[in-house]
Amino acid sequence: MKALKIAKSPDDAIKELLSSLFENQKIKGVFSLFYDQDYFYGLVTDKELFNKLTPTAPVMPANGGKMLSRLTMIEPPAVPIAVVLKPCELRAFYELSKLEQANLENLIFISFVCAGVLSLKEIKNNIEEKVANANQKQGLRECCQLCENFVPENADLILPLIDGDNKTTIFIKTERGEELLQGIENNLVEEDFDSAKLSSIKEERSRYREKTWQNLKTENLGIPGLIDIFGRCINCHACGRACPICYCNLCYFDSADNDSGPRVYEAELERRGALRAPSGTIFYHIGRMIHVSLSCVGCGMCSDVCPVSIPVGTIFTRVAEETQRLFNYVPGRNLEEKIPISTFEIKEFEELGEA
Amino acid sequence: MAQTFEPNLIGFLCNWCSYAAADLAGSNKLEVPANLATIRVMCSSRVDPIFILNAYLRGIDGVIIAGCHPGDCHYQTGNYYARRRFALLSKILKTFNLDPHRFRLSWISASEGQRFSQVTKEFAESIQKAGPNPLRKKPFID
């Protein structure tokens, strides 16, 4: 793969590349993670503000894919914009585009091999210090520690981020990426992207994943096990609000359809002589699994925003693994692949319906 | 006298085939489980897996969704979508060990009154063997 070498830290290398693309009128703006008092996603068209970029910082204040979809849903930008996203955010953005919630036109995607992000609860205090000291595991989201899709597939430019101090290699993945750099960067080298280091990270993640599933043992849970996990849910629906895939403006579970009037309560009391409040929490979580698990990218926003520390993302990742395998589907892998429940094959699941 | 357990069943029946099959079974005086509450839907794909989940959490003993045979859908392809949704729901229920055997998808055409009677009777028997949904009487579930 063709690559560009810059003798700087990854963030500075991206800043330098984006600045020169901007000066050469190849891009008119940048959507990325910024730091100014706090971390946040932003779109910037003023070059003076490029120094606030921190594209590879191990923080996810919101899922960037969801944030970008909000900006591009109605129309794509009229001018080319460079977008720097983590791999799972990019995959979420692709899923949202399949769901007609995002436009990919005029966006140039830059992504990087992701070492995971710090849990938002971890970084509430001393945010700069904790980001500077973020090492492989401490304080990382559980979803990141068990993520096996940390290498971006669909970006135009990708950074492996394993070069060590002040050396950054930017790989050019697509023709569009090559066009972009034409006439700007001429010192391209030919290099292999895959490395032993990447596969060793992947092995480590897979081991952690296996271990987590063994502790979780979802197949033994049943309703009592689910109550153990979700019983303390306060029904705030923050997990859905933070989820990149849960895009509905009016969620079914917030709608009048799902309101339980006196008739429902009375029937419940007649049957069980008791009811639980808030009600419908397990219904909500399994319902959300039905709605979004096929597109779940495992970003872990849901776990991070949960005020009562339910490991929502871990459970969802476990279910998503099963449902996605059922349809041999990897969310965000390929724009041509339809989301499984929006399509069908004539010859499949033929044992269903015959009984 | 020992009390026998009569399962509470819901049948989501497609207007164009299985509902007519239920009608036919009735006109032909074929036996159908008495405690099968039928809900007519315009297509098996109208059945959101959420409906089934809701019924399960509220203590239903069994749910059957019946639609047109593959290739015969009144709307051409609805039953193929229904099949995928059912597969998805079953997978999620299996992952958490939540009684996937209480839910069934069956293709029953308008002329198959006999099959309607057979399938529902057989389903009721299998649920009878499996016993009542433990959630039915359990307080503080959801």
Image (cartoon, coloured by chain):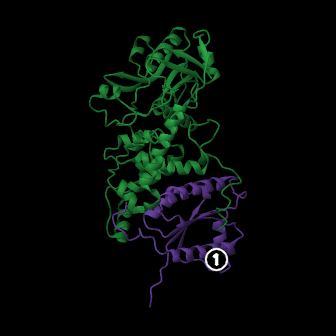
Chain colours: A green, B purple
Question: Which one is in front, A333 or A336?
Answer: A333
Chain under disc 1: B
Residue A310 coordinates in the image, percent (x, y): 35, 48
Residue A301 shows in the view: yes
Is any atom of residue A147 visible in this view? Answer: no
Q: Report helix, strand or loop for mark 1.
A: helix
Residue displayed at 56% across by 40% down: A331
Q: Position of residue A311 (x, y in %)?
A: 38, 47
A185 left or right of B68 in image:
left
Q: Looking at the picture, how far across and down is residue A207, in whole percent?
A: 48, 45
Residue occupying the point 65% across, 63% down: A353
- Front residue (pair B78, A107): A107
Residue displayed at 50% across by 23% down: A83
Q: Position of residue A21 (x, y in %)?
A: 53, 12
How crowded pointer 1 is (Cα within 10 Å; few <14, some 14-19, many 20+) is rated as: some
Three-letter amino acid code at the position of disc 1: Gly
Q: Which residue is mark 1?
A: B26
Q: For residue A95, what is the image quadrant?
A: top right
B102 and B25: which is toward the camera: B102
